[in-house]
Image: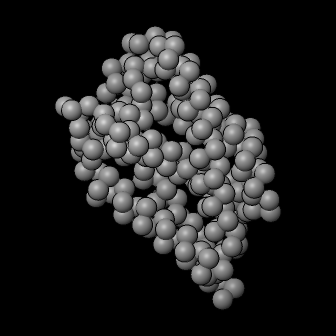
Amino acid sequence: MNTISPRRKILLILVALLAAGVSPNLFVAAQAGHSTLHHLALVILLPSLFVLAVVYGLARLWGFTDVHHQMSNGIIAGLVATLGLELVRQIGFHMGGMPGDMPKLLGVLLFNRFAQGPSLLSNIAGYAYHFWNGAAFGVIFSLIFGRGRVWLGTFFGVLIGIGFMVSPVAIALGVGYFGIDFGWGFAATVTLAHIAYGLLLGLVIHRLNTGAFSLLSRITELF
């Protein structure tokens, strides 16, 4: 059992990371033209949520309480951090720093109602998807870095923001990479919003993940 458990734990973590990484990349894939977000949500997002739920249950069943707790803490921290991101993003949006209300756009794409526009249900779905993406990044951060550091969370958030600004999403929105075709407000809003996200993520994870191991620490268990 001593030789199997570390390998099983690492495999479980890797599956969790892959499943958690699906959701944030679907919007990018859709904007890159691979398929519609509506289709991707049905055939990829929903199965990934099921896989993550199975991993969460297996971690508890097999006695990997650290993995189980770090997944829970990652979700909590990610949701709290997304609240901070939303506060900054909403301020930036109302000051003209964004070309549209991103969660509402996500809802329109999820429900394939681009011609009809947003509805109450699509708005709810869009915000749910947006907040789940934040929670998914929280799970990823929590499992990879363990307790981490506040500065590491902030850096992680900035990297997510940069990734967003150089992704096909920026082109699809018509703002260009780093919002060069829209104005400095776009880059400022996205950067500040993701600094807020990363800062809160790092703070909450550091507080909740006491005694947690990082993924790199778990890999050393194999040797």
198 relative to 100, above or below: below
- Furthest residue toward front: 120
The residue nearer to you, when weighing 177 against 110, is 110
132 relative to 92, above or below: below
State the quadrant of the C terminus: bottom right
Is residue 126 visible in the rendered image? The answer is: yes
135 relative to 86, above or below: below
Q: Where is residue 48 in the image (x, y as percent from the top left)?
A: 41, 61
Color scheme of the displayed model: one colour
- Furthest residue toward bottom: 1
State the quadrant of the N terminus: bottom right
Is residue 25 visible in the rendered image? The answer is: no
Q: Residue at x 37, y 56 (%)?
A: 45
Question: In screen coordinates, is 131 left or right of 36?
Answer: right
Question: In screen coordinates, is 64 left or right of 136?
Answer: right
Q: Residue at x 60, y 38 (%)?
A: 83
223 relative to 166, above or below: below
> How many labels, in total?
0
The quadrant holding residue 177 is top left
Q: Which residue is drawn at 73% across and 62% down?
A: 213
Q: Which residue is drawn at 42% across and 50% down?
A: 23
The residue nearer to you, when weighing 129 against 24, is 129
The quadrant holding residue 200 is top right
Q: Position of residue 101 (x, y in %)?
A: 42, 27
Question: In screen coordinates, is 160 left or right of 32?
Answer: right
Q: Position of residue 12 (x, y in %)?
A: 55, 71
